[in-house]
Image: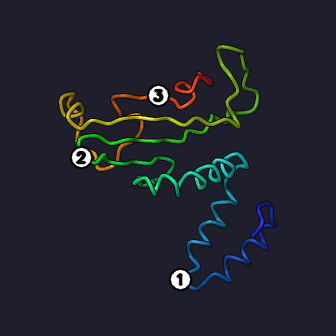
């Protein structure tokens, strides 16, 4: 199913997918219908990264990848964050309020469970980048971006 196809053609394609093995494909068609071109592009970036990260032991949930280190003491987190899509009429001020639509960031973090326990945070089976005690953006580490 091509993105941008008519809604009736999309519905016909979904009706054809009545076999249970085809349901993930149907979800993908519906998801693509409701996503912006930017979200679809970021999905493609994530899909490109996923095999290499999986080979390195990362598991994915949404736009976040988790991997526990071999010592079991820390978790390494990678998160893909899309730039905001502001409502029409938003005023942008260079250096103060930038238009981030069409941009994305790769956030990196290291989670140490002992630090979280010390600070009173509850145990979490899945860690988001904002839960980490050490955080940075990939661009900052390589000298690009903010």
Q: Which residue is mark 1?
A: 20
What kind of colouring is applied to the model shown? Answer: rainbow
Q: Is residue 35 left or right of residue 19?
A: right
Vertical relation: 109 (above or below) 25 = above
Left or right position of 141 against 103: left
Give the Cα separation between the discs numbered 2 and 1: 38 Å
Disc 2 vs disc 1: which is toward the camera?
2
Q: Quadrant of the C terminus?
A: top right
Residue name at image x 79 percent, y 73 percent: 9
Judged from the image, the secondary structure of the residue bearing numbered disc 2 is loop
Asked where in the image residue 47 lies, by quadrant, the reply is: bottom right
**Residue identifier under label 2:** 72
* Of pointers 2 and 1, the one earlier in the residue sequence: 1
Residue 118 placement (x, y as % from top left):
18, 29
Question: What residue is shown with label 3?
Answer: 136
Q: Is residue 29 left or right of residue 60?
A: right
Could you tell me which quadrant the N terminus lies in? bottom right
Instruction: Give x and y (percent) for residue 5.
Output: 80, 65
Q: CA distance from mark 3 to mark 2?
A: 22 Å
Q: Position of residue 36 (x, y in %)?
A: 70, 49
């Amino acid at each position: 199913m091509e993105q941008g196809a008519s809604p009736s053609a999309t519905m016909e394609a979904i009706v054809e997918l009545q076999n249970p093995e085809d349901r993930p494909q149907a979800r993908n068609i519906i998801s693509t219908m409701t996503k912006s071109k930017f979200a679809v592009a970021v999905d493609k970036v994530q899909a490109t990264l996923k095999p290499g990260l999986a080979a390195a032991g990362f598991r994915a949930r949404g736009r976040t990848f988790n991997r526990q280190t071999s010592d079991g003491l820390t978790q390494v987190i990678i998160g893909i964050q899309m730039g905001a899509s502001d409502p029409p009429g938003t005023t942008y001020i260079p250096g103060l309020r930038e238009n981030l639509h069409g941009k994305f960031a790769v956030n990196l973090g290291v989670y140490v469970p002992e630090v979280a326990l010390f600070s009173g945070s509850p145990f979490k089976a899945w860690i988001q980048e904002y839960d980490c005690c050490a955080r940075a953006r990939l661009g900052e580490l390589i000298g690009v971006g903010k």
